[in-house]
Amino acid sequence: MKHLLLSIIAILFLASCQSDPNKQMDEGTITENIYRSKEMGWTMQIPDGWTVTHKNTVDERAEKGLEMMSESTGVEFDVSQLKVLLNLQKDQFHNFQSSAEAFTLEYEGHWKENNQAVRRLIYETYTNRGIQVDTSSSVAIIDKLEFQVFHITLYGPDGNVILYQDMYGRYINGHDFNVNLNYINDEEKNELLKAWKRSQFE
């Protein structure tokens, strides 16, 4: 359920300070502006002008996100196994979030079924809070791996767009792996998308 959590907390920006980036993640390392996750077999270049989000900020967003989810759905979510990977930000409207959680496949199509259920919960969580939202789905290929993509557009009371979210997910090495791109401007979107699409997977 972690990408539902990340989707909700994306709009809960808190100011954060930059410190040792390697202490801001549960898994992975950053060397010379390149992030590497051994568990995911994932490598990504951090784009210029983007900073690693302080883990205290990620944790605070997570806490508020859980409160919102529970209030909207009446369900208690267990994210104790969630691993924070690379999280980046440029400002309050533009950030990159990634996470992984151990996921045991019990039958063929199990991950895709779970992914669809999470998408429904995302939609319901927003609409239950009176937020106007449009969604669509697509498939993207990143370094020869197929990712399921959930596109979300959030609107304010005046009907103007307040945030775009592109949520990429797939099953990798026994994990439910997710990457979220949150943006409002094309320039920042393109910066994130370029860096993400140049990722390499072993």
Image (spheres, rainbow, N blue to C red):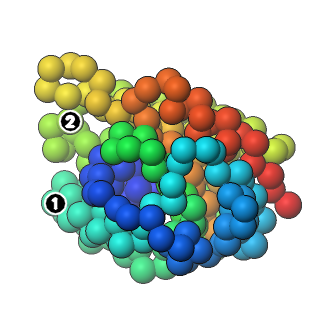
- In screen coordinates, is 95 left or right of 74? right
- Is residue 4 placed above or below 190 in the rendered structure? below
Residue 102 in view (yes/no): no
- Is residue 57 placed above or below 130 in the rendered structure? below
Q: Which mark is residue 82?
A: none
Which residue in the structure is indicated by mark 1? 71
Residue drawn at the location 20% of the way across and 36% of the way down = 131
Which type of secondary structure does the marked residue at label 1 adopt? helix
Which type of secondary structure does the marked residue at label 2 adopt? loop
Name the one closer to the observer, 47 or 145.
47
Task: Pick whichever of labels 2 and 1 is earlier in the sequence.
Answer: 1
Q: Report the quarter where the C terminus lies.
A: bottom right
x, y percent for residue 63: 27, 69
Name the one closer to the observer, 40 or 183.
183
Real-space Cα separation, disc 2 to disc 1, in angstroms:
14 Å
x, y percent for residue 171: 67, 59
Looking at the picture, which amino acid does disc 1 mark?
Glu
- Other-residue count near label 2 (Cα within 10 Å), few / some / many at <14 / 14–19 / ≥20: some
Looking at the picture, which amino acid does disc 2 mark?
Ile
Q: Residue furthest top?
A: 159
Q: Report the quarter where the N terminus lies.
A: bottom left
Residue 154 in view (yes/no): yes
Which residue in the structure is indicated by mark 2? 131
Name the one closer to the observer, 134 or 27.
27
Residue drawn at the location 71% of the way across and 40% of the way down = 197
- Is residue 32 placed above or below 82 in the rendered structure? above
- In screen coordinates, is 170 left or right of 126? right
Q: Dividing the picture into quarters, in which one does residue 34 lie?
A: bottom right
- In screen coordinates, is 152 left or right of 176? left
- In screen coordinates, is 13 left or right of 96? left
x, y percent for residue 129: 16, 44
